[in-house]
Image (cartoon, rainbow, N blue to C red):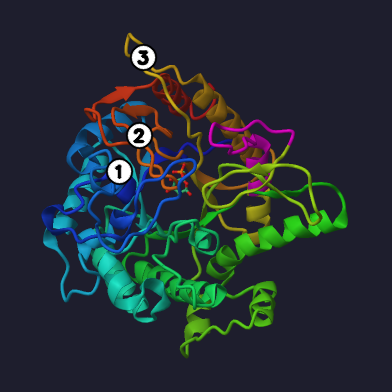
């Protein structure tokens, strides 16, 4: 089986990391707008509203809100078949719980999706990518409150209805499982010291599972053409050695990470998670009918992000730590690392795909993958990002082998940050993923001018040959 001729080559971004225009055209504050910048040493912080003297990178980001036409033209030049972005909930419902949506916010995404279709680019939309209206955090405590389920459903009804015929590929929550690990909390939860962290997180996750199932059912009802996936953060986890305790530690980690997709793809909580929660004294409050909803509202495909594999040890280990923005682990001595300490493992992508497909038997979609690196603009203006080309080439080879040799159905590939944008993990600009360079630095200085990198022409050739010429 070769790559299908309809294979969705493209790239991915998220609203809060690229749009900017954070208060324009009626947009409300999003939780991402009160997230400070950090760096390799300083963690990003959720502040209580906008504080003077703090720098918030989402406010301008790369100004995609005003420059999307230019950017989509560049994506079209590379031959993108699809473009993954997210809708900022706070553009549609500025506070999250108004009686009616904001027309200017709705219009922006009509314009954006129309612009994509002008070039035959299929939008792939994440409904909630690490953000929500800040009003919902203040008033309801974010996803810890059950009422978020109805508010989310209302938001979904508006966007499914508005963009019917324009958007066919959806994902409910970006990296839904990051709620369990995040350095900042993607579900907007600011966990108080007196709270039981696991209790809060899994109750919030339950609300998201129900919201996701409802979105799947609603999306299918509004347009049977819709394909609605989950989006899970995953990479295969290796045991540090063949010692059974190490093997168990690796397996435990995978089971924790996959429990979220288990619910969304199989429609029920895995027994191991239920037992773990019970042992931790966590009680999930469910509404009547939730279990049926979860069973009925399973996803159509498995969207996932893969940046690296991980290693776990079940015994004391001498090996150092490997980094990641959400999950990390023990260092793998066989793998090189990025400048941010993320270990590079193309074979791990193939193993990840085998594992996900054999577990869920649903088509896969690699919706994030890529190398965050510092790029240098040469005096002649060129950016020679051969390291990025190498990373992507090896990962494309790996997923092609998974398709062609292992027979795994793969819908598409959207490398992360196809245009440079704000890093989710650190809030930096200098950690770049793009084929397109954006002139902006960590402090928010720069002209915002766009520039093609060497990888731009390379990816264009890859798409033109459907992955044959790497
Ligand atoms: C994922 C997120 C993205 C993204 C990416 C790269 O976890 O879904 O939003 O930013 O990782 O991470 P970072 O920006 O921290 O380098």
Name the N-terminal-most of marks 2 and 1.
1
Q: Residue at x 24, y 67 (%)?
A: 158
Label 2 close to label 1 by CB (< 8 Å): yes
**Could you tell whether 469 is left or right of 56 in the image?**
right
**Could you tell whether 199 is left or right of 55 in the image?**
right
Residue on which the image places disc 2: 419
Residue 427 in percent (x, y) is at 38, 44
SS assignment for the magenta stretch, majority: loop
Residue on which the image places disc 1: 18
Label 1, secondary structure: give it. helix
Q: Residue at x 58, y 37 (%)?
A: 341
**Could you tell whether 143 is left or right of 199 in the image?**
left
Name the N-terminal-most of marks 3 and 1.
1
Label 3, secondary structure: give it. loop
* Measured Cα–Cα span from mark 2 to mark 1: 9 Å
Stretch of the chain drawn in magenta? 333-352
């Amino acid at each position: 089986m070769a790559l299908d001729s309809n294979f969705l080559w493209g790239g991915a971004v998220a609203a809060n990391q690229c749009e900017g225009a954070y208060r324009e055209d009626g947009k409300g504050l999003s939780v991402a707008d009160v997230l400070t910048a950090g760096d390799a040493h300083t963690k990003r912080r959720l502040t209580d509203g906008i504080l003077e003297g703090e720098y918030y990178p989402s406010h301008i980001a790369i100004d995609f809100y005003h420059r999307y036409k230019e950017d989509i033209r560049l994506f079209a030049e590379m031959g993108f078949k699809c473009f993954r972005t997210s809708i900022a909930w706070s553009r549609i419902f500025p506070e999250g719980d108004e009686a009616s949506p904001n027309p200017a916010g709705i219009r922006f995404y009509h314009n954006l999706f129309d612009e994509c279709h002008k070039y035959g680019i299929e939008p792939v939309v994440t409904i909630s990518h690490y953000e929500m209206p800040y009003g919902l955090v203040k008033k309801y405590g974010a996803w810890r409150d059950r009422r978020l389920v109805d508010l989310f459903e209302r938001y979904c009804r508006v966007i499914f209805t508005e963009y019917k015929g324009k958007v066919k590929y959806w994902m409910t929550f970006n990296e839904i499982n990051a709620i369990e690990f995040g350095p900042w909390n993607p579900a907007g939860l600011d966990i108080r010291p007196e709270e039981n962290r696991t209790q809060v997180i899994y109750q919030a996750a339950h609300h998201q599972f129900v919201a996701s199932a409802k979105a799947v059912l609603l999306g299918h009802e509004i347009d049977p053409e819709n394909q609605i996936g989950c989006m899970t953060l995953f990479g295969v986890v290796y045991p540090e050695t063949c010692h059974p305790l190490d093997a168990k530690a690796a397996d435990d980690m995978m089971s924790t990470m996959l429990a979220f997709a288990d619910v969304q793809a199989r429609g029920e909580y895995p027994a191991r998670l239920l037992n773990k929660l019970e042992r931790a004294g966590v009680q999930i409050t469910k509404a009547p009918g939730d279990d049926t909803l979860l069973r009925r509202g399973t996803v159509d495909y498995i969207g996932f992000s893969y940046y690296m594999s991980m290693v776990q040890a079940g015994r004391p280990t001498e090996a150092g730590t490997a980094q990641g923005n959400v999950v990390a682990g023990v260092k793998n001595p066989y793998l090189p690392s990025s400048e941010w300490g993320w270990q590079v493992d193309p074979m791990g992508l193939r193993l990840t795909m085998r594992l996900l497909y054999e577990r869920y038997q649903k088509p896969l979609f690699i919706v994030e993958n890529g190398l965050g690196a510092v790029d240098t603009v040469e005096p002649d203006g060129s950016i020679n990002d051969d390291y990025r080309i190498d990373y992507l080439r090896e990962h494309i080879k790996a997923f092609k082998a998974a398709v062609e040799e292992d027979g795994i159905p793969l819908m598409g590939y959207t490398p992360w940050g196809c245009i440079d944008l704000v890093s989710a993990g650190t809030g930096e600009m200098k950690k770049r993923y793009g084929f397109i360079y954006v002139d902006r630095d960590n402090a928010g200085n720069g002209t915002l001018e766009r520039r093609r990198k060497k990888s731009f022409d390379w990816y264009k050739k890859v798409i033109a040959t459907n992955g044959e010429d790497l």
